[in-house]
Image: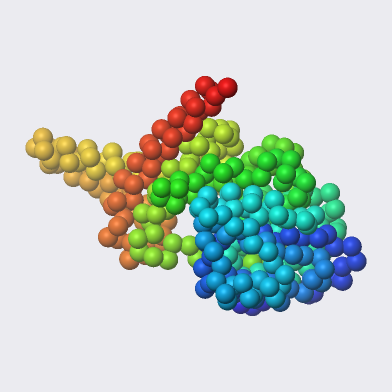
Amino acid sequence: MADDAPGRTEEPPASTGAPHFTVVVPTLGRDDLLIPLLDALAAQTLDRTHWDVVLAFDGSGLSPAVAQRMESIGACAATSAVRQGPGAARNRGAAHATGDYLAFTEDDCVPATDWLARAAARLELDPGADVLEGATLLPDGSPARRRHGEALTWLPTNLFVRRDFFRRIGGYCERYFDASRGIYFREDSDFGFTAIGAGARAIYDPTPRVIHPREHPGWLDPIRWAERYEMDPLLASRHPRAFRDEIEVARLGPFRMRRPFVRACAGFLVAAVSALVLVLMGEGGLASWFAALAAVLLLVVWAKWRFDPRRILVLPAVPIVLVAALVRGRRRAAHEADAGAVAP
């Protein structure tokens, strides 16, 4: 699958002093995801002596089929009986690692057969690099996340981090997870901001490639997406300047707009409530203007899912869920800050 992705180039030169990688994969233990990943790892062209694998099972066990695949490539498991979130799972996997670099990917990804070989070739050229990010592509070959120049996206689907550096900055922050709802978000951005603040030498190379499925395929997924915004206030409190300058900033030539999706959701709620109040007050003409504004803003929200008609039924609930998640997140971040202030 990954070998057919656009942008394939000639084979990398033979490696003479490749770094050792430990591939770290957080997983909920789904066979339909893990088996294709393990098969892709088994097909890697980099010499087997230069890499190993740790699967970090998060609140789940491993099936006989997965155990057999793991045994065939010498992979080990780092398990937790309680689900702790992907950040904690990555940290747990990293604690079992022996490689010079941690090679992070996810259980729904399929790496190209030369994934590790390409990364090794680039790191041999840049031996001082603390972080290398490869290309994460959708099945049609388009990028999974929009990139601005050579800046890293910090997607943990294709991220190589020097193990000593990872340990020095404390790994992933484990607070970006709500165990009661299984919601997680922004731990990758937090890791990136922390790494940059620590002076990481980070590089991007499009030749190590993995394929990631398109997100949000289900018609109810927009609700789940909106719930994840609960984590934004935590990121804003930990990295206020980076959050303001980097998170969901739309660029149109020289112009920048911060968080257009969030603003559209908030604006829709204000316009819709205003229209309802005006109708109750008998101001039908003015109410129609606010209703029209609400409709336009809902179109902006719908654009996030490329005007998929399957999302129409749940679309009006998205702004409500998102704003509620932000309010809940602010309370949570404030509570954690207060708890930290009084801690001995």
Which residue is the extreme one toward the left?
Answer: 282
Q: Is residue 290 left or right of residue 93?
A: left
Q: Quadrant of residue 276?
A: top left
Question: Is residue 167 at least partly visible in the picture?
Answer: yes
Please tell me which residue lies in front, 169 or 203. Answer: 169
User: Is 210 placed above or below 129 here?
Assistant: below
| Count of marks overlaid on the render | 0
Q: Is residue 183 left or right of residue 166?
A: left
Q: Quadrant of residue 304?
A: bottom left
Q: Is residue 237 left or right of residue 24?
A: left
In the picture, the quarter occupied by the N terminus is: bottom right
Identify the residue at horizontal 87%, vertical 68% (top origin): 15
User: Is 238 placed above or below 308 here?
Assistant: above
User: Is 253 placed above or below 334 here?
Assistant: below
Identify the residue at horizontal 34%, vertical 41% (top origin): 324
User: Is 143 placed above or below 243 here?
Assistant: below
Q: How is the image coloured?
A: rainbow
Identify the residue at horizontal 72%, vertical 37% (top origin): 198
Which residue is the extreme one toward the right?
Answer: 16
x and y, in percent, of residue 166 in the image:
72, 46
Question: Is residue 132 at least partly visible in the picture?
Answer: no
In the picture, the quarter occupied by the C terminus is: top right
Q: Quadrant of residue 241?
A: top right
x and y, in percent, of residue 75 in the image:
69, 67
x and y, in percent, of residue 299 in the image:
34, 54
x and y, in percent, of residue 232 in the image:
48, 41
Identify the residue at horizontal 27%, vertical 60% (top origin): 313
